[in-house]
Structure formats: structure tokens, C-alpha cells
Image (cartoon, rainbow, N blue to C red):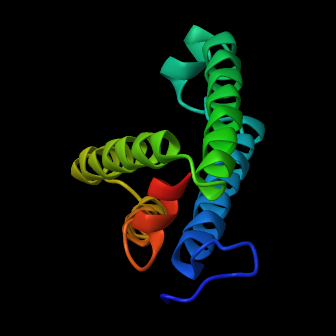
Amino acid sequence: MSGSTTSGRPTSVTVSFVIWLIVVLANIVQGIISLVSGGGSSAAAQDVGTAPLIGGAIFAFILAVIELIIVFKMRDGRNWARIVLLVLAILQVIGVGVGAASGGNAFGWIGAVAVIVATILMFVGGANAYFRRR
């Protein structure tokens, strides 16, 4: 994976970009499904109402849009975006670990593995030279 595309971008960065896109879009879909399926099916959630659920969904959507912008900046060779994605990857892996302690699901683990792979790809092959060049 040390090759590069016609744009001069290393293949490892392109593959990382695609993985990040899939992860972010999967998170958006998961949030929509949770919202539509009535994540508030427990009695306690019904007592609180749907406002926190809708507010949380809107906040998650805004964060996902910001993350998409950062992913595209990483693809364009912005080192600051690569560092931000590294921090987000660490936070996601920690979140999956905490979720696993409270009965997390397989999709969280799959997403965490994908994020780890995407993060590693941002730092291997010709990626470091690509980000220094920009």
C-alpha cells in the first residue's frame, strides 16, 4: 500500500479516507435508526419525553457533519485533520470499551476496529510525507 493515486495521495490515505467515510455514514444511519425506532421504549425514557432524544440526535448529526468535513480535510493532506481524527479514534475506542463493560454490541466493536485500521493507515506508507508536503 505504498503506492499513490493519480492525485499524488498515497493509497493508504485514500483507503483510510474511505474507511472513515463508511464509519461516519454508518454512525449517522445508526443514529437515525435509533431515533426512528423509538430508543425511548423503556418506562423511564417515556417519562422524560422525546425532547432529549431528539436533541441528542440533532447534536450527533451536527457532530457527524463536522467529522465529515474533517475527514475530507484529511484526504486533502491537512495534518491538523489527521491529528483530530486520531483523537476522535482514541475517544471512540475508549467509548466502545466503556460500552462493552455495560453490555456493548458487536457493531461498536466493528466500528472500533475500522477506526483503528483507518487511523493506522493515516500514518503508514507515504502518508507522513504526504501530510508534511501540504
Residue at 57% across / 10% down in the picture?
A: 48
What is the x, y in percent for residue 68? 68, 44
Residue at 45% across / 76% down in the picture?
A: 126
Residue at 53% across / 30% down in the picture?
A: 42
Left or right of 79 on screen, residue 29: right
Q: Quadrant of residue 10?
A: bottom right
Left or right of 79 on screen, residue 52: right
Q: Quadrant of residue 34?
A: top right
Q: Quadrant of residue 98?
A: top left
Left or right of 68 on screen, residue 121: left
Q: Nearer the viewer, residue 122 or 41?
A: 122
Q: Is residue 62 visible?
A: yes
- Of all residues, the one furthest to the left in this rendering is 101
Q: Is residue 34 above or below residue 111?
A: above
What is the x, y in percent for residue 83? 40, 44
Residue at 59% across / 68% down in the picture?
A: 19
